[in-house]
Amino acid sequence: MASEVGGEQRCGTGARLRGGRENQGLSLAQAAERLHLDPGTLEAMEAEDFAALGAEVYVRGHLRRYAELIGESPSELQELYARRAPAPRPDLTRIARRAPTRGAARLVMPGLLGLAGVALLALLWWLLTTPGERAQPLAAASRIPRPKGS
């Protein structure tokens, strides 16, 4: 897994993580306990099964913390991770949508008719209970005093 290139040792991210952990004398369970992670997460990282860890932000965070624990350079491991073949991103432009259920559509029309009926009854009640203005007889209007001199 490791090879000498230009005087520096190069290998995959997972191999460097495993080697660093073993150099520290830590078992997988001990490293997982110190990082407060599940041992399966560390196994996936050492096997370079980064898809099992979820979103890229989680992978980068786990890599950084694991590198700090074993004394590796987090930036180098991040760079190794970034250089690997990028995982295909999901096409979010085509999100499958479920067709609406027929049961909900059957309730729309009766609900609208019921709402219209309640509104009509409220309008009728308001018209019948509101006192209307009564017309004043014209004779009362003729009793209004007229100004003198007109």
Image (cartoon, helix red, strand yellow):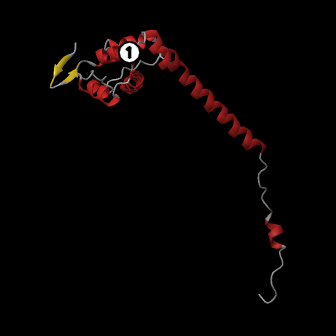
The front one of 135 and 52 is: 52
Quarter of the image containing the N terminus?
Answer: top left
In the figure, is residue 30 to the left or right of 125?
left
Counting from the top left corner in percent of width and height, residue 68 is at: 40, 26
Rendering quarter of residue 76: top left
Q: Do we see residue 55 in this rendering?
A: no
Rendering quarter of residue 7: top left
Q: Residue at x 62, y 30 (%)?
A: 115
Q: Residue at x 83, y 68 (%)?
A: 140
On screen, residue 61 above or below 150: above
Counting from the top left corner in percent of width and height, residue 40 is at: 42, 10
Counting from the top left corner in percent of width and height, residue 129 is at: 78, 43
The front one of 121 and 84 is: 84
On screen, residue 19 above or below 79: above
Q: Which residue ends up furthest to the left in the rendered image?
A: 6
Q: Do we see residue 19 in this rendering?
A: yes
Identify the residue position indicated by label 1 in the image: 21
Tell me the SS state at disc 1: helix
Counting from the top left corner in percent of width and height, residue 127 is at: 72, 43
Q: Which residue ends up furthest to the bottom in the rendered image?
A: 149
Q: How many marks?
A: 1
Quarter of the image containing the C terminus?
Answer: bottom right
In the figure, is residue 133 to the left or right of 23?
right
Label 1 neighbour load within 10 Å: few <14, some 14-19, many 20+: many
The front one of 94 and 101 is: 94
In the figure, is residue 46 to the left or right of 144?
left
The front one of 44 and 16 is: 16
In the figure, is residue 45 to the left or right of 101?
left
Q: Residue at x 40, y 22 (%)?
A: 66
Q: Residue at x 22, y 21 (%)?
A: 9
Rendering quarter of residue 137: bottom right
**Label 1 sits on what residue type?**
Arg
